[in-house]
C-alpha cells in the first residue's frame, strides 16, 4: 500500500489531558494543572527537537461543551495552531474520562450527545489539517479502563454504584465503536 504514513514519527509524546470530576466531584483540568496549556509552544518545540513529531492531546469534552450543544473549541484551535507552527501532529482524544456535568456515560442520551460532539469536533478539525495528513482521533481514552471503572468501582462521579453498572460496562466500547459513523466520519484508515 502506498501513500504517506499516518503518523509523523514512530515515537510519540503524550500530554496528560484528563478533564473529569474526581471521586469527590472536584472538576479536574490536567492540561491547565500541569501548565501544559501555558507552555504549548515550548512543549511542542521540545518534542520536535527530540524527533517526537506525533503528540497525544485531549480536546476535553467536559471543558469543550459547557452547556448542552454549545461548544468552545478555543483550546483545540490554540493547540492545532501551535502544533502546526512547531511541526508536530496532534492525535486528538475526545473523551479523556470527562463528560459534560449534566451527563453520565449511563444516561440514555449519552450516545446522541457524544455523536453530536464528535461531529462538531470533526467539523472543527477539518480545516485545521491538510489532506496529506488527516486528523487522527481517539473517541474514548483508555476505553477498557473506563469499562473497568464502571463495572468494578464507584469512582465514575455522578453514576450508579458499581453493582448496578456491571450490565452496562460494555457500553463505552460499543459507543466508541459507533462514534466514527455517528459523527459522519469515513471509515478508519488502517496503516499498511
Image: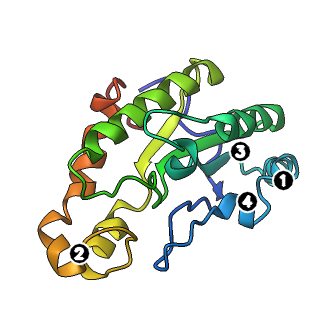
In this orientation, does residue 192 appear?
no
Q: Which residue corresponds to the image point at 28% horizontal and 29% vertical from the top-left?
A: 181
In this orientation, does residue 4 appear?
yes
Q: Badge 2 is on which residue?
A: 151
- The local crowd at label 3, few if under 14, some if 14 to 19, many if 20 or more residues have their Cα within 10 Å, is many
The x and y percentages for residue 100 are 45, 51
Q: Badge 1 is on which residue?
A: 38
Q: Nearer the viewer, residue 157 or 51?
A: 157
User: Whole-Å distance between the Cαs marked 3 and 1?
Assistant: 20 Å
User: Whole-Å distance between the Cαs marked 4 and 1?
Assistant: 7 Å
Which label number is shown at residue 32? Answer: 4
Q: Which residue corresponds to the image point at 72% horizontal and 40% vertical from the top-left?
A: 79
Give the answer, above or below, for where 173 lies relative to 167. Answer: above
User: In the rendered view, does 141 fall on the left or right side of 44?
Assistant: left
The x and y percentages for residue 175 are 26, 47
Q: Secondary structure at mark 1?
A: loop
Q: Badge 3 is on which residue?
A: 53
Q: Nearer the viewer, residue 28 or 36?
A: 28
- The local crowd at label 4, few if under 14, some if 14 to 19, many if 20 or more residues have their Cα within 10 Å, is some
Label whose residue precedes the other's in the sequence (4 or 3): 4
How is the structure coloured here? rainbow
User: In the rendered view, does 89 fall on the left or right side of 100?
Assistant: right
Q: Quadrant of residue 90?
A: top right
Q: How many marks?
A: 4
Amino acid at each position: 500500500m502506498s501513500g504517506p504514513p499516518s503518523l509523523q514519527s514512530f515515537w510519540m509524546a503524550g500530554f496528560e489531558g484528563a478533564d473529569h470530576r474526581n471521586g469527590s466531584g472536584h472538576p479536574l483540568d490536567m492540561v491547565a494543572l500541569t501548565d501544559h496549556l501555558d507552555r504549548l509552544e515550548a512543549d511542542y518545540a521540545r518534542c520536535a527537537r527530540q524527533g517526537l513529531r506525533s503528540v497525544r492531546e485531549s480536546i476535553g469534552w467536559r471543558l469543550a461543551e459547557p452547556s448542552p450543544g454549545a461548544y468552545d473549541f478555543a483550546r483545540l484551535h490554540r493547540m492545532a495552531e501551535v502544533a502546526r507552527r512547531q511541526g508536530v501532529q496532534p492525535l486528538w482524544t475526545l473523551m479523556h474520562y470527562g463528560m459534560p456535568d449534566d451527563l453520565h456515560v449511563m444516561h440514555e442520551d449519552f450516545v446522541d450527545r457524544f455523536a453530536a460532539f464528535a461531529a462538531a469536533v470533526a467539523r472543527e478539525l477539518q480545516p485545521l489539517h491538510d489532506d496529506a495528513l488527516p486528523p487522527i482521533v481517539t473517541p474514548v481514552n483508555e476505553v477498557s479502563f473506563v469499562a473497568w471503572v464502571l463495572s468494578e468501582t464507584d469512582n465514575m462521579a455522578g453514576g450508579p454504584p458499581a453493582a448496578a453498572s456491571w450490565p452496562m460496562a460494555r457500553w463505552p466500547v460499543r459507543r466508541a465503536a459507533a462514534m466514527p459513523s455517528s459523527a459522519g466520519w469515513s471509515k478508519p484508515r488502517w496503516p499498511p
